[in-house]
Amino acid sequence: MSNTVKGFDRWDLDSHISKAISDRGWEEPTEIQIEAIPHARKGRDVVGQAKTGSGKTAAFGIPAIERCEVKGKIQAIILCPTRELAVQVSEELVILQGEKGLNIETVYGGTDIEKQAKRLDAGADMVVGTPGRVIDMAKRGHLKMEDIELFCLDEADRMLDMGFFPDVLWIFERTVNREQTLLFSATFPQEVLEAAEEFLNDPVHVMSEDLEVEVPEIEQFAIKVGRANKLWALGRIIGNSGDGSQILVFTNTKRMVELIVERLGKFRFRAVGLHGDMPQNKRERVLDSFRDGSESIVVATDVAARGLDVDGITHVVNYDLPDDTEVYVHRIGRTGRMGKKGEAWSFATGAEVTLVDKICSTWGLEIPFTEPPALPDNRERDFIPRRDDWDEVSDYFGMVRVNMKIGESETTKRALIDWIVKESRIPEIAIGEVTSGDNETIVEIHVEKVAYVIDVIKGRDFLGHSLEPAIVNS
Ligand code: ADP
Ligand code: MG
């Protein structure tokens, strides 16, 4: 190997691969590729660490493809934590092998098991899969492990944590003629490295020199906003994002994914959801349409979005912050890939402000608190109206004080409570203390019911008075 040869030519790769790479327009290998590929090509075990978006797939994919021949026997297996990742890795391998002709099969749950079995029976050279389905296929006799020479874990931190470890070990132990193990991940926490020992034989560790997360291409901001106005802030971000933007919004639960999509729709922002309970084919359709730009807003949970590679994402929004600070880094890693510019916005309710501080100190990041983007010049009305922020006006017990603007002389407290309960059909326990003076009667209503109650009783006739309930800010 000559050091004067630049680009991928330095390696004298399998000709199919070099052609595929140049057809694809890749000029230089990425840092992790430069570090890992030579060792992996020599057959060494490799533990490779590099941040999301740095080209790890090709770092293990190129040596894996070189190692396999068209034999109809599985010579390499690559395990991934989710179906989407398996599909994505497999697609990348198919491109990288060019005209080599390997049969690369993808094996994952949630789709027709018979079809996958048939394809495996026809003879695969490489398998990319999720552990559960791989085991299933092995047990049914469709996936033979005895010819496997190369065992690889993508997103190894996930694959070796408690959830997957037993399945991964089960598969590993059955690759009895294994010659090489490759583990790649964005992070290698100590306990994962310890668990990995079991899989490795005199490995080379190639970790990025600089373990600090480097994300200079991504501008990061945090907005302090109550729960009720996160949607308003999201409206500002979307409304200011400009043509051609690709926005990925993270929330923590499937239910919130659906709610946000629905609510955005009400304000004429078309968004699609992505979460683990959606059928596989639907998830793939969502991803495809996000990739090709026909959808520009995707709302997702972490599980569904982990490791996904969609080029051109311009904005990541943390509608809710993740509890685990590392998840934040994974999320924002979706933008600014391969040197592209990106923006990451995080919403923090009062209690979550310390979480932003924790993320900053753990990862050496700077995330300034700012206001949401202003309305564009030519626009007067908000994209999504700002609401009264009940959380901010509620007290320690979750009670919000509402003035009914009706004097002491005009009614009794009891009559007013009974009327509210009857009209709005809320349990009486949602009403707290009632205090009245000359021209006002203040009723405490629980924060979860208050918006609804105000809506129902506004303008309704109470003993000849039309009520005008108003929040008391104090
Ligand atoms: P990781 O697994 O480290 O998160 P990926 O393997 O998904 O990263 O690669 C991220 C993106 O970079 C993909 O779109 C991939 O095709 C592209 N890529 C990888 N290597 C190169 C390279 N040497 N030159 C240009 N683009 C590359
Ligand atoms: Mg990857």
Image (tube, rainbow, N blue to C red):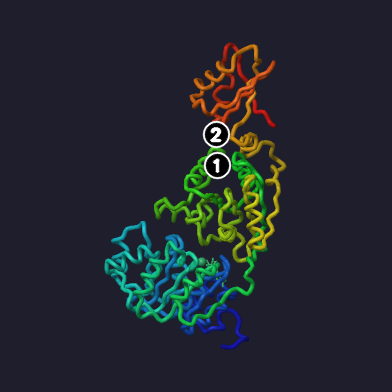
Q: Secondary structure at mark 1?
A: helix
Please report the residue visible at 36 percent of the width from the left and 56 percent of the height from the top.
110
Please report the residue visible at 62 percent of the width from the left and 61 percent of the height from the top.
336
Total count of labels:
2
Outermost residue on the left side: it is 141
Q: Quick check: is the Cβ at mark 2 less than 8 Å away from ligand 1? A: no
- Residue 8: x and y, percent? 56, 79
Please determine whether, in this image, residue 280 is positioned above or below residue 129. above
| Amino acid type for the residue under numbered disc 1 | Leu
Please determine whether, in this image, residue 420 is positioned above or below residue 28. above
- The label on residue 264 is 1
Please report the residue visible at 56 percent of the width from the left and 50 percent of the height from the top.
249
- Residue 86: x and y, percent? 43, 64
Outermost residue on the bottom side: it is 2
Q: Badge 2: how crowded within 10 Å, few (<14), some, or many (20+)?
A: some
| Residue hosting label 2 | 448
| Amino acid type for the residue under numbered disc 2 | Glu
Residue 25 in view (yes/no): no
Instruction: State the separation of the CA atoms marked 1 and 2.
Output: 21 Å
Q: Secondary structure at mark 2?
A: helix
Q: State left or right for residue 324 relative to residue 171.
A: right
Q: Badge 1: how crowded within 10 Å, few (<14), some, or many (20+)?
A: many
Q: State left or right for residue 59 relative to residue 108.
A: right
- Residue 200: x and y, percent? 46, 78
Q: Quadrant of the N terminus?
A: bottom right
Q: Nearer the viewer, residue 4 or 385?
A: 385
- Residue 270: x and y, percent? 53, 44
